[in-house]
Image (cartoon, rainbow, N blue to C red):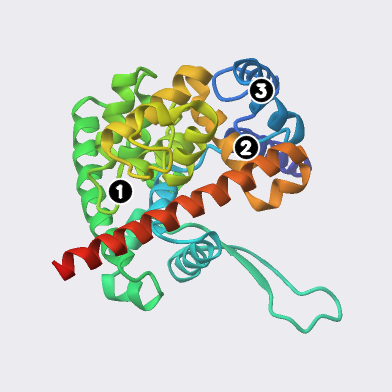
Amino acid sequence: EEEEEIEEEEEEEECDVSTLLRDYFQIGSDSSTGNGARLKTLYDEWSRADPDRMGQITAAIPGVRVLRQDPWECLISFICSSNNNIPRITLLLERLRQRYGRELVRIPPSDGDDGEPWSFFSFPTLRNLSEVSEQELRELGFGYRAKYIRQTVELLSEREEEFKDRSIEQGEETEGYETSCRSSLYLHSLRDHDQSSSSLDHVQTALTEFCGVGRKVADCVALFSLDRRDAVPVDVHVLRMAIRNYGAGEFLTGRGTTSLTPAVYARVGDLFRERFGSYAGWAHSVLFVAELPSFRGVLPVEMVREMDEWKQQEMAEKAAAKKKKVVSKMKKDQS
C-alpha cells in the first residue's frame, strides 16, 4: 500500500510539473498557445500578412514563443531592465534570488570536480522584499533602480491589502495564496480582464502607477505575464524597425526620428495590431528576435544586408544631425 501511495504521489507531482511547464511555455494539449491558436497557425497568418519579411523570418527561426511569466517576478525584472543590458539584468536578478529567495535545489559538483555546488533559488516574495531597504538594494548594485523597487513594493503591498479586503467582502478565498504561488493577488487579477483595447488601457494604467514603470515596461509586463497578447512594447529599436519595414515614417516628422511621444508610441503599436491581429505582441517578439546578432547567421543574406545598410544610414543621419546641432550652437554663440 505504501508503494502504491508513493507511486500516486509521484504521478501527481509529474502531472503538476507538466501542467506548470505547459502553462509557462503556453503549450496546450494540442500544441496550442494560451487561448487555443496553434503557433504554426499564427506563423502562417503572420506570413500571409507580411510575406516579404515575416514569411522569411518564421521559416528561418521557427518556434519562437512568448513565456507566461509570473506577474510579480516579471514586474520587478522589467523595472531592473531600465537602461540596462541583458547580462547585467541577469546578474541583478540572480543576486536578488540568492539573497532573499529560498534555495530550491543544490547540485553537487561532478566527480573529480573541486568546484562549488550549484544552487537554484526561488524569486523572493513580495513579503520578502517588503523587509528590504533601499540601501540594501543599492549595496547589491541596483543603483537608482533600488528606489523604484522599494516604492513599487510599498505600493503593491497596499494594493494587495485592498484587493484582499474586497475579496473577503465578496466571500472569495485568499488564505495561503502567496505561499503557494509566491506571487501577487492584485497583479494576477489583471489577467482576468477581457481582451478589448479598453482593457489593455486599464492594465497599462494600473501598471504605470508603479515607480519606474513607463508605457514600454507596462506593455512588457502585460505581454509576458498578463495574457495581453496584443500588447506591443515599443522602444527606439522597434520604432526604427517599424519605419524601415512597415511605413511608420509616413506619420513621423522624418525617417530618422527616434522621439517616442505618446502619440507615436500608440500609433506604432496600432500599426502592428492592424497588421498582425490579436497576437500582435507575439509577432512583434518574433520580429525583435530576428534583429538580435545571435540570429543573423540563419537569416537570408539579403535581409541581413538590408539591416546593415539601414543601420549605416541611421548612423550617418545621426552624425549629420549632431554636426548640424554643433554648427547651430557655434553660430548662436558667435552672434
Residue marked by disc 3: 43
Check disc 1 and report its element: helix, strand or loop.
Answer: loop
Marks 2 and 3, how far apart in space?
A: 29 Å
Front tag of 3 and 1:
3
For this orientation, the residue located farthest to the front is 335
Marks 3 and 1 close (CB-CB < 8 Å): no
| Residue in the image at 33% along x and 26% along y | 200
Marks 1 and 2, how far apart in space?
A: 33 Å
Q: Foreground: 71 or 267?
A: 267
**Which tag, 3 or 1, sits closer to the chain's start?**
3
Residue type, label 3 = Tyr
Residue marked by disc 1: 213
Crowdedness near tag 2: few (<14), some (14–19) or many (≥20) residues, C-alpha within 10 Å: few
Q: Foreground: 178 or 221?
A: 221
Residue type, label 2 = Asp
| Residue in the image at 48% along x and 38% along y | 224
The percent position of residue 320, horizontal first and vertical second, equals 42, 55
